[in-house]
Image (cartoon, rainbow, N blue to C red):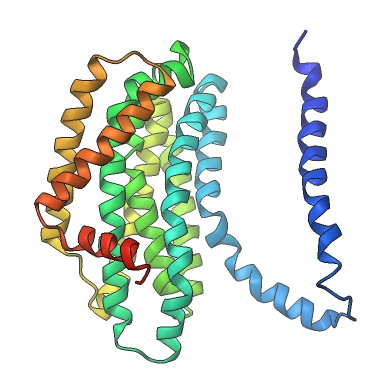
Amino acid sequence: MKDQSDLSLYVFTIAIVTVLNQLPLFIYLKRYISFVSVNWIHVWQLFRSSLAYLLPNGQLNLYTSISCVVLGLVGTYQQVGIFSNAFNILTVAIIMINTFDLVMIPRITKMCIQQSHSLTKTLANNMNIQLILTIPMVFGLIAIMPSFYLWFFGEEFASTVPLMTILAILVLIIPLNMLISRQYLLIVNKIRLYNASITIGAVMNLVLCLVLIYFYGIYGAAIARLITEFFLLIWRFIDITKINVKLNIVSTIQCVIAAVMMFIVLGVVNHYLPPTMYATLLLIAIGIVVYLLLMMTMKNQYVWQILRHLRHKTI
């Protein structure tokens, strides 16, 4: 019989499996590494310097934890579960987009060191390409959620649908915020400014959660997070105006038009499909095809740039 007494066993099992899974890697590593004496003063200097990057790496979890803690204090544990599960889905999409940042950081760092004038152009290019990915994700999440939650969470999580309608916009805002921060602020050594903005954002999110959750419950937590992230994004845009980075308005409008059309198609198709995993996968595939075809029809320059990159394996 499964009950709360199994929690310790569950945690131990997860931990031991994780450790055992890594052991074979260490066995083979001994062929390629050798042990040397460590200069602990140098280690401490590196550790102290790395502390400045603690907040940027934990920003996503920090704000989510604040929302969940306040929900637990002001609201109910059921609301905490619903909010956490909904945000976990967003986190998967956000992490997928953020891998793009990690790939581009070395190249942009090299440009900065060489004082290349293409830094501004590359940053603007990356922002426009990211919007091509995130805008359809926002509309796609909203479109598939009415059937997705039934087989993934269960009927008791029906409030996930309107909650996701509010939270989905974060798939656009958070990655764009992180892109500017990682590909500009960190690279030009404005880490103190970045940390200051994260700290102010955390305080802002806490205050908004305390006020809005009291009146609007779980939706108040979503609104608080949305306002906080939007505030930080405005701050980031103010930062990059100094280097004259601009979005391609024509491309952004094309993305929105294609995403809205995709949303309509998915809404119609979803009406005739059962709430199953395979139906959700089919909806995702249909959404990708419809969106790409529309963007190619409108001759979006960044879509064709991505397709050429995939063909020639060059950036």
Is 93 left or right of 70, judged from the image as shown? Answer: left
Q: Vertically, is 269 above or below 1?
A: below
- Quadrant occupied by the C terminus: bottom left
Give me the residue at 81% from left, 72% from top.
32
Give me the residue at 82% from left, 82% from top.
41
Give percent across and percent down for residue 80.
53, 27
Nearer to us in this view, 311 or 93: 311
Q: Quadrant of residue 291?
A: top left
Give me the residue at 77% from left, 77% from top.
44
Give percent across and percent down for residue 153.
49, 20
Is 24 left or right of 65, judged from the image as shown? Answer: right
Is 9 left or right of 225, judged from the image as shown? Answer: right
Q: Vertically, is 231 above or below 242?
A: above
Nearer to us in this view, 277 or 94: 277
Q: Vertically, is 151 above or below 41?
A: above
Q: Vertically, is 105 above or below 9?
A: below
Q: Quadrant of residue 311?
A: bottom left
Residue 35 visible here: yes
Is 237 left or right of 182, judged from the image as shown? Answer: left
Give percent across and percent down for residue 182.
45, 68
Give percent across and percent down for residue 84.
52, 32
Give me the residue at 34% from left, 13% from top.
274
- Quadrant occupied by the N terminus: top right
